[in-house]
Image (tube, rainbow, N blue to C red):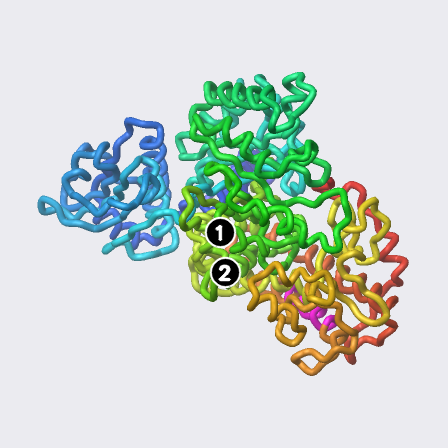
Amino acid sequence: MSGAWQPAPGHWLARLLALVLAVSAMGHAHAEDGYDLWLRYGPLPAAQAEGIRAQWEVVVAPRDTEVQRSAREELLRGLAGLLGHAPPEAATPQGSGALVVGTPASSPLVAQLRLPLRGLGREGYVIERVEHAGRALTVIAAPDDIGTLYGVFHLLRLLQTGQDVSALAVREQPRLQLRVLDHWDNLDRSVERGYAGESIWDWHKLPGWLDPRYTDYARANASIGLNGAVLNNVNASAQSLAPAYLEKAAALAGVLRPWGIRVYLSARFSAPIELGGLDTADPRDPRVRRWWAAKADEIYRLIPDFGGFLVKANSEGQPGPQDYGRSHAEGANLLADALRPHGGVVMWRAFVYSHAQPDDRAKQAYDEFVPLDGRFADNVLLQVKNGPIDFQPREPFHPLFGAMPKTPLMMEFQITKEYLGFATHLAYLGTLYEETLQSDTQRPGPGHPVAQVIEGHGHALSGMAGVANLGSDRNWCGSIFDQANWYAFGRLAWNPRQSARVIAQDWVGMTFSSDPAFLAPVVAMMMASREAVVDYMTPLGLHHLMGRGHHYGPAPWDAGSERPDWDPVYYHRADAQGIGFARGRSGSNAVAQYAPALARQFDDPRRVPERELLWFHHVPWDYRMASGRTLWDELVLHYARGVDQVAAMRATWAGLSPYVDAQRYRQVASFLAIQQQEAQWWRDASIAYWQSINGLPLPVGQAPPPHSLSYYQSLKFPFAPGHH
């Protein structure tokens, strides 16, 4: 307003206006701090919003049950944000069009429409555009209330990503039954391998205080189809099964239940001793069997829909059935028998390695579990990590997949980035998950990918678990882009045959912007990011080169642990002649655990994929690669390529500030700067160590490390997050 009176800078009104503007700015920043995840429901372009409002003059949705209310409230919330205001509610369709939600049992209209709901199961749904009584209806229908909730989130996703909703014909159902987040959270709120603050579960204040954050957690999980949460660490405290903590778990179950999420608990195998006062936890002891049966009865009185137990046994010092000369099957079946009357399941982890030193730790799970195929109870799933070592930046798929046809195998992925740069490195794990799921087990023949194995064909149970990356940080995951890994895990747990690229496109559109000028470069960054981490950390099949205990930073020189297989030198076996772990027939023969055709391929250095060469073979430094370069030159160039890719991601992000709010933009930019610095550190420290062994010069144009090897070896990080 030209010529209008303005208060002097020191005037009380000027100070008041400044305060109002500051508070307003704080509110905007708070709204874009990452808390809303991919459920921001930002306004659509005006013309698009107007067109949708014209289609859906009213919303017809039941509200009689907890899940119905969740679906209705989420739909109205989403439409209000996307359209400026939600259409009014009505008991029946009115005007020329309506959005209708329901099941044949909850909606007489849905019952009349006779939509094709047969075969969807309780979690499936359809979204269809139909004509009824002269009105155009968009209908979200399902056999059960939980299906309508998933359908609501699907429709909102289509709107958020700018899809055409004028002629929908969607039919969806999950390919896996159990879609579970595993929280490695302790009762003191510390999180093993956690990089996003304390545990979100405030056990001390439960059951009296139910943080609203628990509901938002449930909403986010339901939006991507997850239906279970293991509340406590696999390195479990027996106290998690004590009466006081069961009451706390029951309170959480009450919050999660309206969103279709069941709670599970990690069970400590020795709990009958620690809680029950017994002198044994032997699965064959009748007292032990009675104790577990009584404990299951107690749990189900408090939590009628309790999902069951997750168990880590006889691994890394955890108690288990082998302490009594019993098998993993006997231990799992003990708990399965206790849970069976209530419909509960046991998820028995296959991550085991014994106190006895094997010739190759990668072989232990296969050796222990394959002889037990068919001996597990029908309510037991064997939970298998994606690879045979431990969530490395890259591993070949676990040989157990396809090798136990009489036992349902449940995939375990790690969402928290224990080995991929914690919260600060951008590493989209959708590509890692997809790589594993699409790997062909070739059992019983070609064309049998890992995804097919975990879909449980011929078994009553199937599932996928993800080690959560969540904490008390305002943005949930420690960084904005780490949210994408939670999102991708949920989408792939629903359908393990989906495209990681398509999932990334949806996440970017919902979390930031669907503008092609923003979406295309960011998706490209994400799709290249995990490969960059592999290159600057563990190229060409190297693995487990991280610092001991905390797993932060490079330490390929590390040795001297009480167990050799805790040390990087055990895995790379570098000497003056070459580098890599010999797992072929002339080595540990780990290749024999794969299908014969794969075993022959992996046994041949010329046929094994170069990305896994040093996983399976100890190779001379002067070995000629497909590029014509020596192994040493190729290795150094991979390190450089990883660093260069991070620099390219920084440059890409630097040009995208107009599309992102300032707060999230700054955090991503800062974290990319950290990543570039640490990628360079990984490259330099690793090369310095390898040169100390092989004495070889660097390829032309490659700069030497700026510090001596002793400098890199002197770096210590006793307080790195997630330390174990």
Q: Which residues lie in the magenta part?
A: 635-646
Q: Which residue is mark 2?
A: 443
* Total count of labels: 2
Q: Using the image as rendered, state which of residue 654 and residue 224 is in the foreground.
A: 224
Q: Position of residue 166 (x, y in %)?
A: 24, 55
Query: Farthest left residue?
Result: 133
Determine the image quadrant of residue 678.
Answer: bottom right
At a point 81% along the width and 42% down the height, the residue shown is 718
- Report whether 256 appears left or right of 266: left
Determine the image quadrant of residue 707.
Answer: bottom right
Q: Which residue is mark 1?
A: 405
In three-dimensional space, the C-alpha distance between marks 1 and 2, rounded to whole angstroms, equals: 9 Å
Whether residues under marks 1 and 2 lie with C-beta atoms below 8 angstroms apart, the answer is yes
Q: Position of residue 431 (x, y in %)?
A: 54, 59
Pick whichever of labels 1 and 2 is earlier in the sequence. 1
Query: Farthest bottom residue?
Result: 628
- Report whether 467 appears left or right of 126: right
Label 1 crowding class (10 Å Cα cut-off): few <14, some 14-19, many 20+? some
> What kind of element bears circle 1?
loop
At a point 65% along the width and 76% down the height, the residue shown is 606
